[in-house]
Amino acid sequence: MERRGLLEDGSGGKRSRKATIPGPGEPQVTETATEGLRDRIDALEGGYEYFLSYAAKGYKGEPGAGGGELRRCLDDMDRALAGLGGFLASIVRERGLEPAPAFDGFIEVLAGDAERARKVLGLVRAQPGISSQVIDNLNGSIHLRALLTDLFLIDEILRPRASEAIPAAALANEKPPPDAAST
């Protein structure tokens, strides 16, 4: 599962910004709610990408194999999933997005996917040693993949619509139509 540009810094490199995910009881919606959503997506997608690398290393599952990076990724993903449905609902309400029933229905689906993915992660986190094969199976989990797809969809929908002010021809890299005021 790949999402172009999410972790790129514009120069082809990766962002080094560390995800800051609010814990339980911390305010969920602020003026930087979009950044909070981006942090959650970065933690989840970054974990998924790290898992691809970990799965290829052939670890047998001995405790401590792979160092602490795997556990840190699992913990970051768990924090990103905690309260995700409520966080998104708060963003939708804060922005007054309509139609509310459509957003509510989708957020209900996403919250269920997040809870299932969190339970799968919890099972893996509970293991004293985690093999590459376990991580490969985790990455292949329909629960994790469905959640990532849900997040990519809602992220695109919630993203500010800079394109609304740009004529369709300009979006297609064509010359924009002449300005009506200049004719």
Image (cartoon, rainbow, N blue to C red):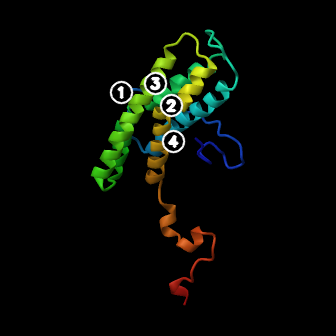
Q: Position of residue 13 (x, y in %)?
A: 71, 42
Q: Is residue 121 above or below residue 85?
A: above
What's the mark number on residue 38? 4
- Image quarter (top left, top right, bottom left or bottom right) of the N terminus: top right
Categorize mark 3 by other alpha carbons within 10 Å: few (<14), some (14-19), many (20+): some
Asked if disc 2 and disc 3 are in contact, CB closer than 8 Å, the reply is yes
Which is more N-terminal, label 2 or label 1? 1
Q: Is residue 89 left or right of residue 52?
A: left
Q: Earlier in the sequence, mark 4 or mark 1?
A: 1
Secondary element under disc 2, as helix, strand or loop, is loop
Mark 3: amino acid: Val
Task: Tell me how far mark 2 sits from mark 4, CA to CA.
Answer: 22 Å
Per the rendering, the mark at residue 120 is: 3
Position of residue 173 in the picture relative to residue 145 (left or right): right
Residue 156: give x, y in percent of width and height.
48, 52
State which tag comes first along the sequence, 3 or 4.
Answer: 4
Q: Quadrant of the C terminus?
A: bottom right
- Residue 25's tag is 1
Point out the frontmost of discs 1 and 2.
2
CA distance for labels 3 and 4: 22 Å
Report crowding for label 1: few under 14, some 14 to 19, many 20 or more residues within 10 A (C-alpha): few
Query: Which is more N-terminal, label 4 or label 2?
Result: 4
